[in-house]
Amino acid sequence: MCGRFNVVQHPMMRFLQEITGQSFSVETSLNVTPTEQTPVLVQSDSSWERRNMRWWLIPHWSKEPTTKYTMFNARSETLEKSRAFREPFQQRRCVLPVSGYYEWKTESGVKVPYYIEPESENGLALAALWDRWHGNDKVIESCTIVTAAAPQAMETIHNRIPVHLTREQIDSWVNANTDRETLAKLLAPEVRVPLRVTAMSTYVNNARNKDERCLEPLGEAVVIH
């Protein structure tokens, strides 16, 4: 799964320029947690839009916004079977750009956070879905991150990974005309860019902590290909 991530302003702005050919402004957001707002890329005709969305999908048919069901991640294996995710998967695929994300391992009784970031890229383009909810004169756009089973190289960190896309794969993911076979390949559990994995301070375990200490390493990084 993916339960926290970071957006670091200047590398992310460069990353957005690289993958879209357009300039977008973003602010640094550290230790982003489910239900918070985050920048999402949606393709409209031949151009991109950067929208702020709630990271916890609210299906358009839901009676009200709720966190009763876990909607911040969507399992790739069941997208077409899920009432909540089936239509967004078919019609509203998007990209959630992050600088890196966290996973946790319990070591000697302590939940140790590991920060996972690209070794040489300015960010990661995560496969995501979005929806728009209307109610009581309110409109909420929200999103979810698609996850897959962890490939062998990542299994020691967590049994799931967010699906990350190469620059060449992004257009296929958001294209409404992409066929099922291609989508299945995009959802394959793969490490597509070298990832740097670093044990971090347990300071990040507290979701209220949002400052630079969330990027404080505990040890040496390991690169996974």
Image (cartoon, rainbow, N blue to C red):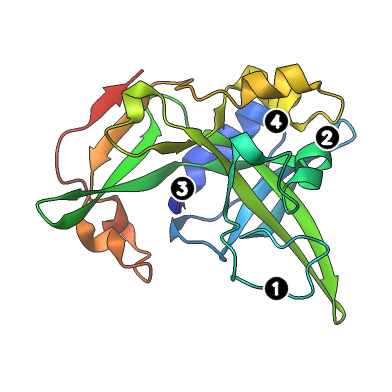
Query: Which element carries disc 4, helix, strand or loop?
Result: helix
Q: How many marks?
A: 4
Q: Which mark is residue 138?
A: none
Check whether the beta carbons of the residues at disc 4 and disc 2 lie within 8 A of each other. no
Query: Looking at the rendered structure, which numbered label has been put on residue 47?
Result: 2
Q: CA distance from mark 1 to mark 3?
A: 21 Å
Residue flagged by tag 3: what amino acid is it?
Answer: Cys
Q: Which residue is mark 1?
A: 65
Element type where label 2 sits in the image: strand
Q: How far is mark 4 from mark 1, CA to CA?
A: 31 Å
Nearer to us of marks 1 and 2 is: 1
Question: Sequence-wise, which precedes: disc 4 or disc 1?
Answer: 4
Residue 47 in the image, given as x and y percentages of width and height: 83, 34
Which residue type carries mark 1?
Answer: Pro
For label 1, the SS is loop
Measured Cα–Cα span from mark 4 to mark 2: 8 Å
Q: CA distance from mark 1 to mark 2?
A: 30 Å
- 122 relative position to 75: left or right: left
The local crowd at label 4, few if under 14, some if 14 to 19, many if 20 or more residues have their Cα within 10 Å, is some
Q: Quadrant of residue 188?
A: top right
First along the sequence among labels 3 and 2:
3
- Mark 4 and mark 1 in contact? Answer it, CB < 8 Å: no
From the viewer's perspective, is 5 left or right of 213? right
Hey, which quadrant is residue 69 in on the image? bottom right
